Image: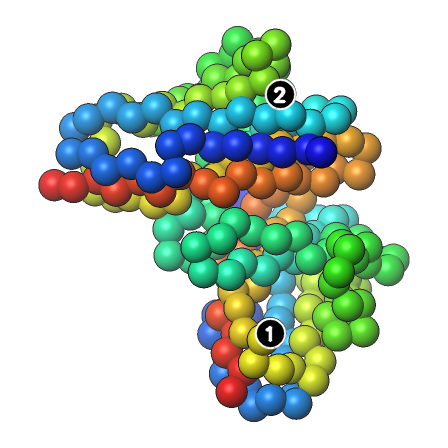
Amino acid sequence: EDKVVQSPLSLVVHEGDTVTLNCSYEVTNFRSLLWYKQEKKAPTFLFMLTSSGIEKKSGRLSSILDKKELFSILNITATQTGDSAVYLCAVESGNNRKLIWGLGTSLAVNP
Amino acid sequence: GAVVSQHPSRVICKSGTSVKIECRSLDFQATTMFWYRQFPKQSLMLMATSNEGSKATYEQGVEKDKFLINHASLTLSTLTVTSAHPEDSSFYICSASRDRAEYFGPGTRLTVT
């Protein structure tokens, strides 16, 4: 059965800390892995990763994929209170483009 | 770029009535759109995949006669919740596919009284 597991489930840090969020997966016919940030409303797209070892960066956020070990990490450096959100990982599987979602990591950044 | 809008953002309706939710891709064309629902503190649950000009593909357990999806143009998909009941109260989110990534709308909070 296809599955996506995120860890930790929740995390509380102080402003300025660096955090690493994990996403591991077991899917058939892997196509891509996507990271999203969800605050009070719908998720916002962050990154899509398809190739191992190529880091994607956007400001203080970065992500990398390891297709051999079947996981991805999302790093946030110098965290700010505005980074508080649920971070969702999803894996695109198979020819029908189905997304399999993790349960998310709830990040709280305290001032 | 890649902005998706939803309307309305919040709706309250009485049990037995129907509600239509619109999903629009504002600055790109999307042949494929997706409809999700999300219960509190749970992840997204895919309801159906909407393809422009053809019938939607529903996930197992989703009633196609209750959740009517129409994708009449490359920028608009609609979800109609027919004969709504309180258990249909949820957060409904659409997304539009572009370059193999999905861009989400802001969601619609439906409350059925």
**Could you tell me which chain the residue with mark 1 belongs to?**
B
Figure check: A25 above or below B65: above
> Which label is found at residue A50?
2
Label 1's element? Answer: helix
> Which label is found at residue B88?
1
| Residue B73 in view in this figure | no
Figure check: B91 above or below A24: below
**Residue B32's x, y, as percent?**
74, 49
Label 2's element? Answer: loop
Where residue A37 sits, quadrant-wise, is: top left
Of residues B88 and B54, the one nearer the viewer is: B88
Of residues A111 and B86, the one nearer the viewer is: B86
Q: CA distance from mark 2 to mark 1?
A: 36 Å
**Residue A2's x, y, as percent?**
68, 33
> Which label is found at residue A109?
none
Give neighbour class at mark 1: few <14, some 14-19, many 20+ (Cα, 10 Å): some
